[in-house]
Amino acid sequence: MRPIPLLRHVAGMYKKPIDIDALITRLDLESFGSRTIRRLSGGQKQRVALALALAGDPEVLFLDEPSAGLDPQSRQVVFDLISEQRDLGKAIVLTTHLMDDAQRLSDYVYIIDKGRTVTQGTVTELTTLAASEHENRPVNFGASPSLELPQPPAGLHLSETAPGEYHLTGVSSAEHLNWLTSWWAREGILPTHMNLQARSLEDVFLEFAQKEETV
């Protein structure tokens, strides 16, 4: 079976299917439409699977690892489609091992470890809780390579992780940031970029997984 005939066949089972032609164009199914499904790449099969899931214009949509095997461009298209369905008021249940996907797409998250829910909440609730429990945040910045690094205050550690890329750990207060920027001012350093990293869903998952291992 080829992707497009299969998609039209499935859509024909529904009274009010989604706009199939638009979906075919959106997911670029025509680019591999002449091949049988079993000869498609993993990413191409994922696009066909998403199209089939959307074919009947469902009110509730179940998606399992929807971005697995996709190239960056296809991944963005899939994310846009999922976000549009959510904005239309559809209920979407998405399972994934990719915490970036969950953080980007989810309104409410259940983190499951060893078959049971270890925590749940909105993305903001989970990452804020993690941040409050683990106040230290790393700072990454770029500047000229091989800078002579000063001795930081107690609790901070400054290192050059790659030529011109620097990593400061232990940051937990405005005073720590003031120490960093004061050093820049003294030495005339103007960073090319800077990132004060917030906690992520992956951080939350790893923390709970490590707690489970110690129990």
Image: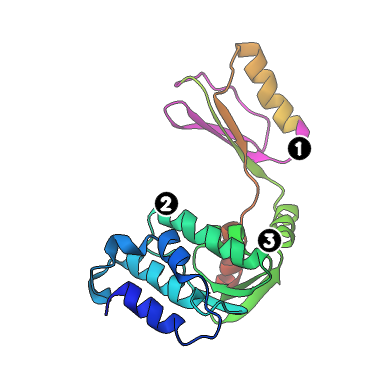
Circles 2, 1 touching at the beta carbon (< 8 Å): no
Q: Quadrant of residue 31?
A: bottom left
Circles 3, 1 touching at the beta carbon (< 8 Å): no
- Tell which of 203 and 39 is nearer to you: 39
Q: Quadrant of residue 152?
A: top right
- Would residue 82 appear left or right of 13 to someone viewing this image? right
Magenta span of residues: 145-174
Amino acid type at image mark 2: Gln
- Measure the alpha-carbon separation of dots 2 and 1: 39 Å
Circles 3, 2 touching at the beta carbon (< 8 Å): no
Q: Position of residue 54 (x, y in %)?
A: 51, 74
Asked if 166 appears above or below 123 in the picture, the reply is: above
Asked if 101 appears above or below 110 in the picture, the reply is: above
Q: Quadrant of residue 70?
A: bottom left
Q: Is residue 162 magenta?
A: yes
Q: Position of residue 154 (x, y in %)?
A: 68, 34
Of circles 3 and 1, which is in front? 3
| Residue drawn where x is 63% and y is 78% of the image | 117
Of circles 2 and 1, which is in front? 2
Local secondary structure at mark 3: helix
Q: Position of residue 33 (x, y in %)?
A: 28, 67
Q: Which residue is mark 3?
A: 123
- Measure the alpha-carbon separation of dots 3 and 1: 23 Å
| Residue drawn where x is 65% and y is 19% of the image | 183
Q: Position of residue 209 (x, y in %)?
A: 56, 68
Q: Which residue is mark 1?
A: 173
Q: Is residue 78 magenta?
A: no
Disc number for residue 73:
2
Amino acid type at image mark 3: Val
Of circles 3 and 2, which is in front? 2
- Would residue 192 appear left or right of 33 to someone viewing this image? right
